[in-house]
C-alpha cells in the first residue's frame, strides 16, 4: 500500500530546464539552456562593503524575524522605481516582498486558482509559471501570440468562451522564451479587456530593465483603471539571483490577500537579503550597474546573432530581441527539434526545445537560446557546432 | 463585479500572532506573544567574518542561481547532525533545503493534501502549520493530547473513523504552544501506527536542540521501519531566523516530490544564506553557540516560573518546560482569557490566547507565554502586571 499523494503531484513533472541545467554543470559544456545572469558582473566588492555596514550597524534586526510585507525602505525603492520606469502609481504599501518572482507567480496561483479554473497565457510562455499554476489544478488556454504580443481578438473570443476564467498571465517585455515585447496598442487593449471582464492580469516583468535598443513603453499597469493588473518584478536579473528577492505590486486590497497567504507559505522572505539590497541601493548606483549588464548583453547578443547569421542554414528564422536574455529560433516545419537537441547534447551544446513552453499545443520546430551567460569564445564555438548539426537536418 | 479569488482565500485569516506582533513592536510593550529568539545572542561578528571569506573566495557562486535541493555541504552537515542528535540514518540526499521550516510545512501540504483530506494534529498545535495546511482545503481532526504526547488510542480510533486521512502532524519536542515533549512509548507507537496504516507523519522539530533539563529521546523517525516519517528542522532557533533556512528530511522517493514542487514554488532557497551558514558551521562551534542560548533561556524560564509562582493566583496552572521557548498557562474553567488578554494589552503586556492553537475545539481558558526574547527586568514586570490582571478575574 503506497503513500497517497495529492493529485497535483502526478500532474507536475520536474522542470526539464532545471534537469538540463544539472547536466550542463559539467565545465566543458556550452550551455545556451539556462537563464543565468553573467556572474562576472555581480558587484561582489560592493556587497562585501554592504555586509560590513549592515552587520556593524544593524546586525540584530538583519538576522531576526521580520514582517511578511518586507523591509519598508526596500518597498519604497521598488515603488519609486516602478513609477519611474513603468509609469505606475505605487506607494510602498502596494509592494509585497517575495522569495523571487517565482514565489510571486506561485502566490498568484494560490490566491486566484481553484481546481479546473482557466488561465490564459501567451503561446509560448514561461515554463516555470506553468508549473507554478499547475499546482493549483488549473487549465491553460493559449492565446495566439505574434511579434507584438497576444492577439486581442483571440483573447476576447476565449474570454467569452470561458466566462469562468480566473487569470491572464503575460510577460510583455523581452518575453521568455521569445525575447519579444508587446506594442503599445496591445498593452492598452489588454488593460481594457481586463477591466471590462474583471479578469486579473499578472504582468510578469523580470527583464524590462535590460533594454539595450529601442524605447521603453509604459507598462500594462499604467493603463489600469480599476486595479485588475498585478505586477511582479525581481532583483535576479539586475542584481543577483542567489538572493531570491522579488516582489508583487498591486492594489492594497489584493496585496492583503497575498500577504496572508505568504504568512502560511514561508512567514517572510530573508531579512538580511532584503537589507543588503536596500543598503546597496542606498550607497551605490544600480543604474551604473545595470548599464554594465546591458552593455555586456548587447555585445553577446550581437555576437550570437552574427554567429547565427554565419553558421545557421538560411531557412532557419530567429528573433532579434531589443533586450533581455533570449533569442528564439524557428526551424522550417519539416525539421524536428528533438533529434537535433539530442545530437547537440552529444556535442556538449545545450539549449531548451520550444515544446516545453507550450502548455497545450504541440510544437517541435522551435528552441530558445540564452546569450547572457557564456563568454564570447564559447558563444561562437557553440553556435558554430549547433549550425553544423542543423545542416545535417536540412533538406 | 468584484474579482473572483480562490476558495482558500476566504478560509484563511491573517495570523493573529503576527498581527499582535506588529502591535507589540512599540518599544514600551512587554511582549510574551512572539516566538522570537534572543537577538543579543546572534553571532554577528562571526557572520561578518563568514561574509568576508565567502565573498572573497566564492562570491560568484554564492550570488548565482543554485540547485533546488540546496547546497551539498549544508545538507551533509544537517544529515550528520540529525543522525547524531535524533538517532536517524540520513545521508545528504535525504535532505532538501527549504525557506524556513514554515516552507517545509507548506510543501508537505502541497505534496499530500487534496481538498477535503483529513489531517490529524495535536490539541493544541502550531497555529501557522494550521494555516499552511488550510490553504490546501483540508479538514483537521484534533487528537487528545496530554503531557506525554498524543493519545495513541484516540489516534487509532480516529484513523479508523477517517480511513482517507492523509497526514499526521506532530511537534514531539517542547511543543508549540505547550512546551511539552512526547515520551518514548508514544514515539514508538506513532511510528508503528504510521507504518501500519501507511499514513505519513510530519515530525516538526524546531526546538529539539534547546533542551536545558532532562535527557534527549530518539526521534519518531528513529523508529520508522518503512519511510513514512518525514522530518523538518530549522536554523531559526539555533542560529538566526532572518535567514529563513530550514529543511525537509525523508526517504529519497518522497524527497523527489518535494523537490519538484519546490521548483514551482520558489526555484530554490537563498544561495548566499545557505553558504553563509555552511561556512559558519565549518569554522565556528555551533555547539558552543547553542550552549549559550540554552543557558540564557534556562535562566529566563526560571525567572518567569519564579515570577508566575509569586504573582499568579494559585488556581492558575502552568507547564514547566525542559526546553524550547514557551510556557503554557491553564486558567480555571470559570475564567475567560479574552477579557484578560484585552486588559493586558491596555497595560502593554501581550501574550497569545490559547484558542488560536485549536483548529476545531473551543478553548477560552489557556494562553501561551514566550520566555526567550524579553530581558530579565521586563519578564518580572510583565508577569507581575499579568498577575494583577488575573487576580481581577478570580472568584
Image (cartoon, coloured by chain):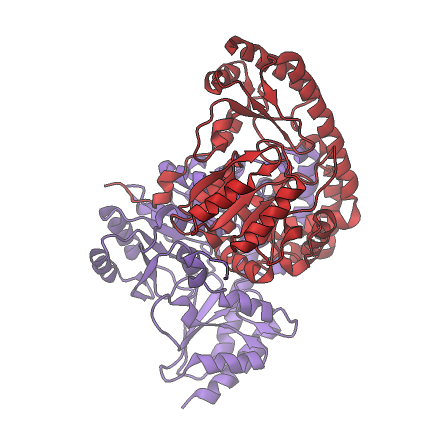
Chain colours: A red, B purple
Query: In screen coordinates, is B175 left or right of A129?
Result: left
Q: Is residue A45 visible?
A: yes
Where residue B52 appears, x then y in whole percent? 70, 41
Task: Indicate the quadrant containing the C terminus of chain B: top left, top right, bottom left or bottom right.
Answer: bottom left
On the question of residue B268 being in view, the answer is no
Q: Position of residue A183 (x, y in %)?
A: 66, 39
For this rendering, which residue is in front, A86 or B274? A86
Q: Is residue B176 above or below residue B75?
A: below
Residue B142 x %, y %: 31, 63
Examine the rendered structure and indicate whether residue B46 appears above or below residue B259: below
Q: Nearer the viewer, residue A383 or A214?
A: A214
Residue B62 position within the rendered picture, expressed as x and y whole percent measured from the top left: 63, 37
What residue appears at the point 72 percent right and 41 percent down from the top-left corner?
A: A216
Q: For this view, does B151 lie left or right of residue A40?
A: left
User: Considering depth in this image, is A166 or A83 the residue closer to the camera?
Assistant: A166
For residue B174, which quarter of the picture? bottom left
* In the image: residue B227, left or right of residue B76: left
Q: Is residue A19 above or below residue A112?
A: above
In the displayed structure image, the side of residue A256 where residue B93 appears, left or right: left
Seen from the viewer's position, the closer of residues A348 and A187 is A187
Amino acid at each position: 500500500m503506497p503513500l497517497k499523494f495529492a493529485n497535483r503531484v502526478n500532474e507536475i513533472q520536474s522542470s526539464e530546464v532545471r534537469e538540463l541545467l544539472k547536466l550542463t554543470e559539467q565545465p566543458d559544456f556550452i550551455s545556451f539552456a539556462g537563464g543565468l545572469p553573467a556572474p562576472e558582473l555581480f558587484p561582489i566588492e560592493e556587497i562585501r562593503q554592504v555586509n560590513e555596514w549592515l552587520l556593524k550597524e544593524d546586525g540584530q534586526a538583519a538576522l531576526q524575524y521580520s514582517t511578511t510585507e518586507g523591509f519598508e525602505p526596500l518597498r519604497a525603492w521598488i515603488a519609486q522605481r516602478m513609477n519611474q520606469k513603468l509609469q505606475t502609481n505605487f506607494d510602498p504599501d502596494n509592494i509585497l516582498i517575495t522569495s523571487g518572482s517565482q514565489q510571486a507567480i506561485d502566490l498568484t496561483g494560490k490566491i486566484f486558482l481553484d481546481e479546473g479554473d482557466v488561465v490564459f497565457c501567451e503561446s509560448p510562455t514561461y515554463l516555470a509559471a506553468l508549473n507554478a499554476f499547475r499546482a493549483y489544478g488549473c487549465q491553460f488556454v493559449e492565446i495566439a501570440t505574434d511579434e507584438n504580443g497576444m492577439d486581442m481578438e483571440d483573447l476576447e473570443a476565449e474570454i467569452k468562451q470561458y466566462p469562468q476564467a480566473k487569470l491572464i498571465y503575460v510577460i510583455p517585455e523581452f518575453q521568455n522564451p521569445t525575447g519579444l515585447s508587446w506594442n503599445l496598442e496591445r498593452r492598452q487593449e489588454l488593460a481594457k479587456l481586463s477591466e471590462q471582464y474583471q479578469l486579473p492580469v499578472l504582468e510578469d516583468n523580470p527583464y524590462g530593465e535590460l533594454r539595450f535598443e529601442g524605447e521603453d513603453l509604459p507598462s500594462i499597469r499604467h493603463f489600469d483603471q480599476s486595479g485588475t493588473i498585478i505586477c511582479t518584478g525581481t532583483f535576479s536579473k539586475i542584481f543577483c539571483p542567489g538572493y531570491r528577492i522579488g516582489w508583487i505590486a498591486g492594489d492594497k486590497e489584493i496585496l492583503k490577500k497575498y500577504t496572508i497567504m505568504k504568512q502560511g507559505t514561508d512567514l517572510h522572505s530573508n531579512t538580511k537579503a532584503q537589507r543588503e539590497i536596500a543598503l546597496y541601493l542606498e550607497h551605490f548606483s544600480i543604474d551604473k550597474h545595470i548599464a554594465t549588464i546591458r552593455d555586456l548583453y548587447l555585445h553577446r547578443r550581437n555576437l550570437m546573432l552574427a554567429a547565427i547569421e554565419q553558421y545557421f542554414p538560411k531557412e532557419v528564422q530567429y528573433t532579434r530581441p531589443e533586450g533581455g536574455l533570449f533569442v528564439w529560433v524557428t526551424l522550417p516545419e519539416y525539421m524536428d527539434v528533438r533529434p537535433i537537441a539530442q545530437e547537440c547534447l552529444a556535442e556538449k551544446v545545450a539549449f531548451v526545445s520550444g515544446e516545453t513552453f507550450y502548455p497545450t499545443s504541440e510544437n517541435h520546430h522551435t528552441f530558445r537560446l540564452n546569450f547572457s551567460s557564456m563568454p564570447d569564445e564559447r558563444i561562437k564555438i557553440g553556435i558554430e557546432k549547433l549550425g553544423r548539426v542543423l545542416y545535417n537536418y536540412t533538406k
